[in-house]
Image (cartoon, rainbow, N blue to C red):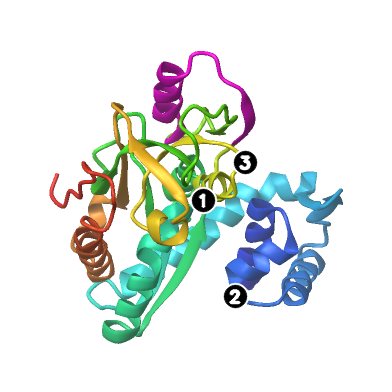
Amino acid sequence: MDLKFVSCLLSVVELGSLAAAARAEGITASAVAQRVAALEAELKAPLLRRAGRVMQPTPQCRAVLPQLRRMVAMQGAVTAALHLRELAGPLRLGAVSTALGDYAPHLAAALRKHAPEVGLHLVPGASSILFSAFEEERLDAAILVRPPFELPKTMQFRVLARQPVCLMRPEHSVPEAALPYIVYSRGSWGGAACWQALSALAPKLEILAEADAPEMIAQMVQDGLGQAVLPDWAGRQARFPGIDVSALPAPSRDIGVLTWTRDAERPVIEFLVRQLTGRGKALGGAGSIRGYETVLNI
């Protein structure tokens, strides 16, 4: 069984479409479909079915998903073990959307210059989804919001940035103007603190929309559709300059990199952490909000 075909199938199951899986795997959607079809022929069972616009696993596929995931994870572990003392091999890095903009370009450039034999695979997603993928060893590391629970000793979380929670309004808007609120999802790890701050700021509020997508919310605020309470990330000012920002007395959102304790001396992970913390230090003075702080050692 070709594990590249298995990886394609798992990407479709996790992302819900051939197109999304193709982007994740770095191939075309037709190639993904061909690989899944070849796997179905080998296993003599249908593995995917379409439900509206979403591709879903069949009951036969669900029955073998744990084994398929273990196979891919084992392959990754073998590859990592072979390259344990080298700057080489795959690096599967998950990241929340705001962190992708802040850290991914710098990391990709550093890898190209200093570690060209490392294959960087970037996986975007919400913090809770990335944590689950990391826990299942489908990711080597993840840049996400600090988990709202105590981590096991097998994991390490290094804070890269502490992002102040702020009220964001369209630039030059009248302070007294009644604008609806675009809410950062209350169920997300980063949105809980924002919701608490928003509730204290405006006990009675008009909600226009709710989403787990700070960048999209910032765009809607800049377009004048409403106001929002969001954590202020380093790249926000450059991408969304048409927003007035005021810091609120609320706990910050901690963004950090999650790795396995066992990988502390693995060269690829050492390189990753060094680049991310260095980038965090460089970004620390980039924000326009007083109180934006970067933490390198915890």
Tally the numbered discs. Answer: 3
Residue where numbered disc 1 is placed: 215
Residue type at tag 3:
Leu
Residue at 36% over, 45% down? 232
Q: Position of residue 258 (x, y in %)?
A: 32, 49
Residue type at tag 1:
Glu
Q: Position of residue 97 (x, y in %)?
A: 48, 54
Residue at 24% over, 47% down? 159
Earlier sequence position, callout 1 versus callout 2: 2
Earlier sequence position, callout 1 versus callout 3: 1
Is 290 above or below relative to 284?
A: above
Mark 3: secondary structure = loop
Q: Residues within 10 Å of mark 1 (few under 14, many from 20)?
A: some
Residue at 54% over, 14% down? 204
Residue where numbered disc 3 is placed: 225
Identify the image quadrant of residue 68.
Answer: bottom right
Residue at 28% over, 26% down? 249
Q: Position of residue 182 (x, y in %)?
A: 57, 34
User: Front-most of 196 and 132?
Assistant: 196
Identify the image quadrant of residue 280.
Answer: bottom left
Q: Is residue 99 left or right of residue 180?
A: left
Residue where numbered disc 2 is placed: 26
User: Front-most of 14 and 36?
Assistant: 14
State the extent of the magenta-drawn residues as a range: 190-210
